[in-house]
Amino acid sequence: MCGIVGGVSKKNIVPVLLDGLNRLEYRGYDSAGIIVLSEDKKFDLIRSVGKVEVLENKLKARKNKIKGNIGIAHTRWATHGEPASHNAHPHVSKNSVSVVHNGIIENYLDLKENQLDQGYKFLSETDTEVIAHEIDLSMRSNNNLISSVQNAVKSLKGSYGLGVISSKYPDQIIATRKGSPLLIGISKNGNYIASDQIALLSLTKKFIFLEEGDIAIVLIDKVTIYDSNGNEVVRPIKSSKLKAGQVDIGSYKHFMQKEIFEQPQAIRDTLESRISFNSVNISAFGDQAKKKFKDIFRVQIIACGTSYNAGLVAKYWIEDIAKIPCNIEVASEYRYRRPILLDKTLFLTISQSGETADTLEALKTAIKINKNILTLSITNTAESSITRLSELNFLTNAGPEIGVASTKAFTTQLVALALLTIALGKSKGNINETQEKDIVNGLKRLPGLITETLQQAKQIKRLAFRFKNKNSALFLGRGTMHAIALEGALKLKEISYIHAEAYAAGELKHGPIALIDENIPVVAIAPNDELLEKLKSNIQEVKSRGSYMIVFEDFGSKVESMPTMEIVPITSNLGRITAPIIFTIPLQLLSYFVAIEKGTNVDKPRNLAKSVTVE
Ligand code: F6R
């Protein structure tokens, strides 16, 4: 949510900033801006509404080219103030200080009042502008930039990742974070800051991940970091395993399409070294996992959006297979109530980005409530805030997910959760070797099964036009397929803007069936499992009310064909673990093709951002 990039370099920094903005655009795309210090130490600022492409064109059209060795840039997802040029970052105070900000300043109105009294003028409606003024205000009594920033952030309430430059200190960027991610990229040609390593992968693989409250002076050849108490600290330089090419679109039309088709490999990478022969390596969850899982009596899962849907599937697995009680709740609710957290609870957070503000805060809340819980995170981002706060970690290794609608992150989360189910069940003595072997073999089959399922893309594409002029759609499933129906509905609404609801099929008759008529297409997921006969009855109930239906079934399900009903056999002989993962694929493809039919922006749907680092 909002992307920051900046750098001090031997070369002109503008191409680095533009490339970084393009790579960070998934974090926000309603406006963008760049500021550099030119040779005469003056600010040169350019901002525009819309995508980074618009900014790029504006830069190209300018006669006097923007150039400099130090600069900061930002791509925005609006919180305070509509998407408009004057609200785009960077913001400038008195031609002396400029800032880019990711996060929210909750007390900005109080600060603004004081700053107005001090004679500051406001050119935007953002919460960020007060930060620039607060630093400038502090510079009146401070003779260096870092102590002015240190002083200014003391008065901020809320979250921030900040990049700051000053015309009075033209050799440095000050970078600081609290509640929003920020890292420093180290290279021979200069040093850089960014909210995500993918912005800098073409420049360096070496990163320093700032800790909560850290502040850094970034010079061309040196980085000095102070912790939240003002003590100089050394943070390790880590080598990124990501490759620049992983964030390129290649021959695909959309990142979402690429990521759907990458799922076989992503799952191979998730399983790699986590299973040996027929068993799961419990140590994949951390060195202490084997010992600590033995003591677990219950599991509490916390997540948002798609990650929550993955957790819902896991609730079924953990209770059904590992025989451990399991609860799940959305993070934005959990963090604001006073939950009871008993000892011997495994507190599991699931998050692709590892930075989702609600999930992170829920984790902090849980640790405050009961220090004796065991925290485990399943994320796709090494060194993320959630990863660093958790005692045990599992990385899904799906590779960067750029499309805003989550696809490969979801299926790899499910694989991680399947491994966790076995690890927990084994540790508690609730799973025997045969069960473990069966599940592991099922997981090993997944890449092949997904490849086969993806071959049905053409057939699914053919069905998409049915949704084009519809305002609503309904998704039905039972058991774990209810969670998959929720995920299918979420995908459809996110990228095609069609209102979509998912119901546990047995719940239909308690209300939602009133909605059904020929204008609401219904999608049912029908694996050949113990609930199939019940689901078939629900399908009849819907069909007799005249709606158009698509049924994704197992070859063995043999759902009775009826007029205006498409039955799409997906696969056969799936198990409890493999079925939800496989049935996710046609739903991803369906929403992708509906979005194409409707001509929406598949990778950057309106109003959304990939990493939700604000409340
Ligand atoms: C949906 C989607 C969102 C995220 C949610 C949580 O396609 O991507 O619903 O799943 O914002 O994000 P993470 O997993 O990064 O915590």
Image (cartoon, rainbow, N blue to C red):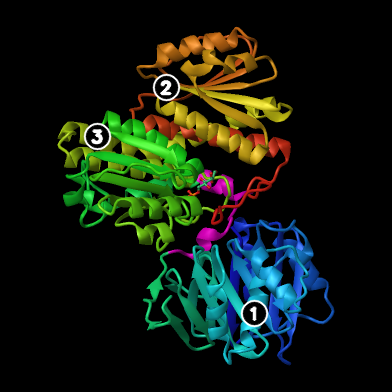
Foreground disc of the pair 1, 2: 1
Report whether 355 appears left or right of 63.
Answer: left
Q: Which residues are magenta?
A: 242-261
Callout 3, which amino acid?
Ala
Is 254 contained in the magenta span?
yes
Callout 2, which amino acid?
Pro
Give the Cα distance between marks 1 and 2: 55 Å
> Pointer 3: what residue?
322
Report whether 154 appears left or right of 607.
Answer: left
Callout 1, which amino acid?
Gly
Q: Position of residue 485 (x, y in %)?
A: 50, 29
Mark closer to the chain start, 1 or 2: 1
Vertical order, 172 against 55 (above or below): below
Mark closer to the chain start, 3 or 1: 1
> Crowdedness of circle 3 by 10 Å Cα count: few (<14), some, many (20+)?
many
> Pointer 1: what residue?
71
Report whether 253 appears left or right of 206.
Answer: right
Vertical order, 543 against 132 (above or below): above
Asked if ligand 1 lies within 8 A of label 3, the reply is no
Mark closer to the chain start, 2 or 3: 3
Q: Which mark is residue 527?
A: 2
